[in-house]
Image (cartoon, rainbow, N blue to C red):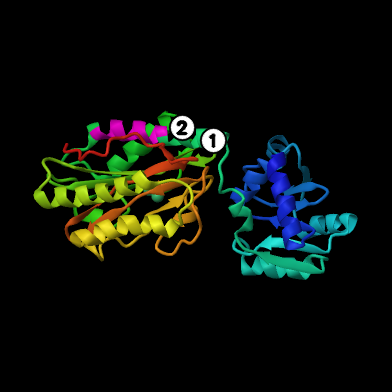
Amino acid sequence: MRLRYSKVINLLERKGLDAILVSDAFNMRYFSGFTGGTGYLLITKRSKYLFTDSRYTIAAQAQAPDYIVVEVDASRDYCKEINAVIATEKLETIGFEAKRVTYSEYASLKEKLTIKGLVALGGELATLRRIKTKEEIDRMRQAEHIGDIAFEEVLHHIRPGVTEIEIAAKLEYIMKLNGAEKLSFETIVAAGKNSSKPHAEPGEYRIEKGDFVTMDFGCVYKGYCSDMTRTVVVGAANKKQKEIYSTVLKAQLSVLEMLKPGLKGKEYDKVARDIIYGAGYEGYFGHGLGHSVGLEIHEDPRFSMIEEDIVEAGMIMTVEPGIYIPDFGGVRIEDMVVITEDGYENLAHSTKELIEL
Ligand code: ZN
Ligand code: ZN
């Protein structure tokens, strides 16, 4: 936590601010340890304050021992308490998280805070979360491992007649039995033609012989997310299914082969995109190649067509190319990897050979 605090102090100095008002729940957790997600942190050059209400005070004191926990009264007038700190510390400029504050919340802060400068920040605090520590990586390794266990087990339940929702429920149940706190996002199970929708919601559709079944799922372990996707075929795959699958796999493996620090996110996206488009599937890969993961399921930087940010050691990224043919079906293969000094470590260990159930 001390290192994280010093990074915030560094940010204050760079931006010429006296303090930062943190309202994003993930940033609150990252910088204080408080998991309640309700209230604000106020980080100044002298002290750290956590403002929350009586529902969370006890948890906040236990989870954020190096913060001064201030309980707001039943009126929930945060500005009154923040103003007290502004007065005692003689603060003149405070940065706030413009991306996470609603317009009405901003209007209220602007009206009530007795501060000269209220300065809009972008994603600067989230940027400080990009490089993961060993402890964070260990948690995500475990989260992805839980995903591997769930995938292996769920294969025994995929057969004609079973619904997508049943498969999703199995995945979620197995992950929770194996240590998951919750899901990192709503599980996607898409079978048959539904698999041509990259973010299909699992429904009542019953799996038929010959279907692709795409499963995109993940869990949260000690606050950190996992993310993986596998696509299988129920019964024997036909020629077109094999061709689509092998093209997606080739794109994914080609990116992994060259993965190391130093290149821009868009350069990796291009490698996968060139392979998929070159095989005749231009127009059928409508999303980016991947994203960073951490406390949040989708973090920056991205592997996208426009990402200029450089991939660095210690980042955790997904590599998830796909091909989606309307009225036919689709394939996505996704691993979550840690970028290391000279390459990467794949946190997913489930096979990527085409599975015909
Ligand atoms: Zn995913
Ligand atoms: Zn993903």
Q: Secondary structure at mark 1?
A: loop
Res 187 seen here = no
Residue at the location (46% across, 34% down)?
141
Q: Dot 2: few (<14), some (14–19), or many (≥20) neighbours within 10 Å?
A: many
Does ligand 1 reach within 8 Å of label 2's beta carbon? no
Query: Depth check: 134 or 199 in front?
Result: 134
Q: In the displayed structure, does residue 17 sit left or right of residue 188?
A: right
Residue at the location (23% across, 44% down)?
163
Quadrant (top left/top right/bottom left/bottom right) for the C terminus: top left
Q: Dot 1: few (<14), some (14–19), or many (≥20) neighbours within 10 Å?
A: some
**Cβ–Cβ under 8 Å for marks 2 and 1:** yes
Kindly identify the amino acid type of the residue bearing the numbered disc 1: Lys
- Asked whether residue 152 is drawn in magenta, I would say yes
Q: Where in the figure is residue 128, as x and y percent of width and height?
A: 62, 50
Does ligand 2 reach within 8 Å of label 1's beta carbon? no
Res 267 seen here = yes
Q: Main secondary structure of the magenta part?
A: helix
Q: Is residue 47 above or below residue 115?
A: above
Residue at the location (84% across, 54% down)?
85
Q: Which residue is mark 1?
A: 222
Span colored in magenta: 145-155
Kindly identify the amino acid type of the residue bearing the numbered disc 2: Gln
Q: Where in the figure is residue 142, as x and y percent of width and height?
A: 46, 32
Residue at the location (26% across, 39% down)?
352
